[in-house]
Amino acid sequence: MRVFNQLLSCLVTVLMTAGTVGAAEHSSNRPPAESDLSLAAALQLAADHNPALAATRHRVEAADARVAQAGRWANPELELEIENFGGKDELRGFESTEATLVVSQALRIGGKIKRGREVAESDFAIAGRERESVELDVRARTTAAFYAVVIAQERLALATELLALARTFAETVDARVEAGKVSPVEATRARMEVAAVRVELIRGTRELEIARARLSAMWGSSTASFGRAVGELPLPGDRPAWNELQALVDQTPDVLTLEDRFQRSERVVALEKSFRIPDLTVAAGPRRFSETGDSAWVAGISLPLPVFDANKGARRAAEFEFEAARRDVQAARVEIETALASVVQRLDAAGEIATSMEAEVVPAATSAFEAVEIGYTEGKFGFLDVIDAQRTLFDARSLLLDSVAEYAIARVDLERLIGRSLDEGGANAGYAGAVERGDG
């Protein structure tokens, strides 16, 4: 009984330990609860735990294994043949049998093994390029998702500030109503404005939660366990010249994959052509004559006659695939260059708009609102003038945030196309808090 209790105790301990380890492994793809999350930390989590990226690593290993398999010879065959038994008279029983043991080996001639290995090596190279492409995709999508959280936080802060301002203005209107300086209708309008801004705050809260969930999904987590996304959106700045961007695109895994696929199709053509030469099979082994007890050797060769199947269909298919691959490379290059031109236009336009909004429009709207707000308390402006100035200010600040967000996303798209960061120094020092402060 004591032994049974000890075994039961050990079993419970093992199960509890396994459960703890499993829980630790499950939670390892989450940042510490309620801690601030930086862009670098988000990128590291995605690199370590993104399911799609993990799948590409396994595909590379599988392609590597196929390269090793492609260089193998066919296995030899062992054949045992017994003749002249179970007949009549002299051939009755096994007294007159002839037993032959033959080992045969198929020889793949015509360079089939070499060319098959070259095709497998092309598959391995393509798998590696695709893994690099997925790494760039994951990095770009994680960065864009991180920026989306930062933008949602800014929008929520803007809505919170607008709500506080609307409430303050409503209190000012109430005071003027009590003093008999304005109509009670203005107090009702002020409260309606507060309610409308509160709806925007609720919408901003939901959008932030959605953005947080999308960011967490990049490292395979179904819930967002981090606190705030701490980082800055990149400021508009200079970009590389067009010819420099084209040169960078030519070195990306996407373009190199096209070249690898073209080379693979060329190698497949060479492999299929090698099948015009049939494989040779050689065989040899001993033969024993039971009647005399003597032994001898037998040997032979066999060669298929390409009468019905000369592999013409496969060769033609490979040649058509080769031509299709060449056209695919041309079409893909045009598509990449078109995407590059489009994202550069987006980047430049968003940068110009953001610069103009931050330097001119937002400061002017801020000054106008402050002047109208002071004038309202002095009786120089009406209620609608204040509401109009307030909305103009926050529309301007919202448009500034939109343009900065568009610039940030366009920059992420451009970095994905060229396969590297525009800021080799590391962190994207840039826009932060200008919307909250309302300064230029």
Image: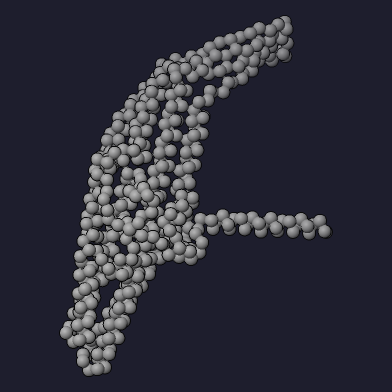
Residue under the point 49% across and 19% down: 108
Q: Give the number of marks.
A: 0
Q: Position of residue 354 (x, y in %)?
A: 24, 60
| 314 and 261: which is toward the camera | 261
Residue under the point 81% across and 56% down: 3
Q: Quadrant of the C terminus?
A: bottom left
Question: In this view, which residue lies farthest toward the left?
Answer: 380
Residue under the point 60% across and 16% down: 103
Q: Position of residue 169 (x, y in %)?
A: 27, 82
| 41 and 203: which is toward the camera | 41
Q: Quadrant of residue 370?
A: bottom left
| 75 and 242: which is toward the camera | 242
Q: Position of residue 130 (x, y in %)?
A: 40, 41
Where 4 sits versus 304, above or below?
below
Task: Classify residue 248 as left or right of residue 115.
Answer: left
Where 172 sits versus 142, above or below?
below
The answer, for residue 146, to whether it is visible in the render is yes
Q: Position of residue 111 (x, y in %)?
A: 44, 19
Q: Quadrant of residue 193?
A: bottom left
Residue under the point 30% across and 86% down: 171
